[in-house]
Amino acid sequence: MNIIEQQIFEARDDKQAAILSRFFKADKGGYSEGDKFLGVRVPQVRKIVDQYVKTAEINDVEELIRSAWHEVRLAACILMVKMRIRAVKSGDANRIDEIYCTYLSNIKYINNWDLVDISANEIIGNAVYSSRNFDILYNFAKSDSIWERRIAIMCTWTFIKKCNPDLTFEICRMLINDNHHLIHKACGWMLREVGKSCGIKVLNGFLDEFANVMPRTMLRYALEKHPPEAKQFYMHLPKGTAMTKIRQKY
């Protein structure tokens, strides 16, 4: 057993495991049906991982990411992120590429929203930003896997931070008819980040065109930083409203 996995098992809390299992919908019919939890909180997992970042190798990551236990896979995601940050600081391009390839080859194990959110943008989003090869995100956005679709939108965060929202808007358009609330939430979250980083007017340009066809959850998340009157305006747009009238009014 990997030393990181061993320490996570030693921190096991069965009561907390039951809570996490319910929270992450691991019951029959839930979005993570069959996932197994040890009841170890994220700060505990981070603390354990921190001890081994300097000495960990890719084979350690591969062993952890393939675990049946959620917190062990979480440790693998945190470890990859921390290893990549170290590699960027040291200019180790080979290690950066190695982590990227390891992530992609084990992507089926990154199978819950917290695993995606904690790792995808740092590892895949930054790589796409550097390469400007968007095909991987377009393919993820069209995937049957909810987690790959979530990866697609979460990986636009790097672009948002650079005040380039076009990719976020494009992926959101691809996902606007998605039937899962976890995708609605992720898209709305990234749209809200567009407003924070690029300005409300930039976000409103997208909302003017799509607010009246967006899922309600996506729209509510996108509008969280808007003033009350703007929220009311966008939440109550009738379908088929002419865009020129929208722009004249708000």
Image (spheres, helix red, strand yellow):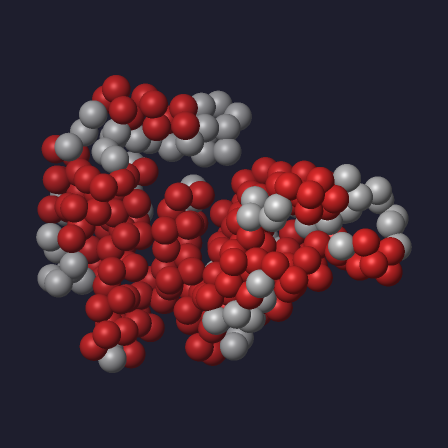
Instruction: Locate residue 153, reporting x and y percent.
Output: 54, 56
Instruction: Locate residue 47, reporting x and y percent.
Output: 16, 46
Residue 225 appears left or right of 92: right
Please determine whether, in this image, residue 244 is positioned above or below residue 148: below
Which quarter of the picture shows residue 205? bottom right
Residue 25 in view, yes or no: yes
Which quarter of the picture shows residue 139? bottom right
Residue 54 appears left or right of 152: left
Please determine whether, in this image, residue 124 is positioned above or below residue 148: below
Q: 66 or 153, which is in the foreground? A: 153
Which residue does the image show at 44% across and 77% down from the upper left?
130
Instruction: Locate residue 119, reporting x and y percent.
Output: 37, 55
Which residue does the image show at 45% across and 28% down from the upper left?
25
Q: Quadrant of the N terminus?
A: top left
Q: 230 or 185, which is in the foreground? A: 230
Residue 137 in view, yes or no: no
**Number of numbered callouts drawn:** 0
Please determine whether, in this image, residue 152 is positioned above or below residue 158: above
Q: Quadrant of the C terminus?
A: bottom right
Residue 32 appears left or right of 140: left
Q: 158 or 145, which is in the foreground? A: 158
Which residue does the image show at 50% across and 28% down from the upper left?
30
